[in-house]
Amino acid sequence: MKKDDIIKLYDEYVMKTYPRTPLCLARGQNTKVWDSEGKEYFDFFPGWAVSGIGHCPPRVVEAVKRQADILLHVPNNYYHEWQGELAKKIVSHAFKGKVFFSNSGAEANECAIKCARKYGKGKRYEIITMLKSFHGRTMGCISATGQDKVKIGFEPILEGFKYVPLNDSNALKEAVSSKTVAIMLEVIQGEGGVNIASKEYLAQLKEICKKQDILLIVDEIQTGMGRTGKMFGYQNFDADPDMITLAKTLGGGMPIGATLVKDKIADLMGPGTHGSTFGGSPIVSAAATAVFEAIEKDKLLENTIKIGNYLIGRLNGLKAGFPFIKEVRGFGLMIGVQLDIEGEGIYKKCLEMGLLINCTQKNILRIFPPMTVTKKEIDAAIEILKKAMSEVKS
Ligand code: PLP
């Protein structure tokens, strides 16, 4: 089908909830994608951080094909061979506890919110979250998100959320009340602009949580599965979460959400308290197990640290020629380039020249190539970025 016809169908039949770029993607392989007219792009923001181990990762494709021939779906009142195996994998990389499977990041966070309320036994229900956070689009998740833009038009939002600035421990201490049951954060805010929690803040937060029996929920939907150079972002810090939420790269391109919670919370969530028809189906669980296998066997954490440092170095190298670059920050391959001009023009120029990146909060470029990216691909992408920046400057 031709690009114009594809777009016409969307225009007529699909809700217009996304600001879309007129790009129709037809094929992807690792760091590259091709559009419906055959043009090739480097994808340095693959699948909005879903394709973190590349497009169509061979181990995942193989697992999906194998499972598709056997059994696609098993309802959650029965058992199948993959769900327990995947839960064990997640636990083995994080902490002792139990996993609930769903289909998206928002659902993973909804489960965490419900678990926290259950733990509060009706007496404590307040959850403190961070300003500039992003936790998803369900009513619970827009209530948890510390940005007004996601809430406008959908009021009244859920009761019981308080927002504090990231890295301000005084504000956090002031916000804690006898009703506080949990604190929820991204250790590196993604959509909010690659804002990194400080080591001291997270250490203080740990103290507060321990002293007052407050649960720590870490939203690892963007930071998880290796992107920061550790399997989970919190492992870069002195943090002891009671729950982590996962999605995006966990499925390697297949839709999955997961909430890992410590046993003291899991034990409260008995039959009938929560559920998802599709959650943890054989095909997505087999795919996610293959994602772990790829990260472990193909040594992707090691590559992420090494190549991430190289990319941060190359981006910092651009500062001299482009003074509008204020800061390059990140961990591993979760990198934000803070500009003091709007980033939309650079994003568009990059697109024209065959490089996909993202611009968030108007002036922060998000550069998140897959963990499989090579030095050569980074060099090629930097050349495009340089040209795009020169054209915007002139
Ligand atoms: N949490 C974070 C940190 C995210 O970045 C996102 C999506 O961008 C979500 C939650 C929501 O995930 P989903 O879109 O899969 O519901």
Image (cartoon, rainbow, N blue to C red):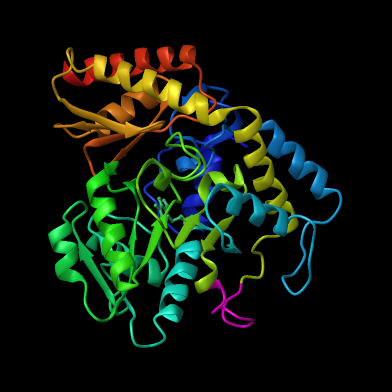
Q: Main secondary structure of the magenta part?
A: loop
Quadrant for residue 210, please give it. bottom left
303 falls in the magenta region = no
- Residue at 34%, 49% in the rendered image: 187
Which residues are drawn in magenta? 266-275
Task: Give the image location of residue 281, x and y in percent.
Answer: 71, 60
Nearer to me, 99 or 375: 99
Classify 321 as above or below 257.
above
Residue 75's spot in the image, x, y percent? 74, 69
Residue 380 figure quarter: top left
Q: To which quarter of the image does residue 275 belong?
A: bottom right
Give the total number of marks visible in the rendering: 0
Query: x%, y% of residue 264?
Result: 51, 72
| 200 relative position to 57: left or right | left
The foreground one among 309 and 324 is 309
Q: Percent position (x, y) of residue 32?
A: 54, 25
Q: Is residue 332 visible?
A: yes
Which residue is pictured at 22% across the width and 41% down the height?
Answer: 362
Where the N terminus falls, by quadrant? top right
In the displayed structure, 241 sits above or below 190; it is below
Say which residue appears at 23% left-offset and 47% top-offset.
200
The residue drawn where x is 20% and y is 51% is 167
Q: Nearer the viewer, residue 5 or 88?
A: 88
**In the picture shown, does residue 125 fall above or below 352?**
below
Ligand 1: quadrant of the figure: bottom left
Q: Is residue 56 visible?
A: no
Image quarter hosting the C terminus? top left
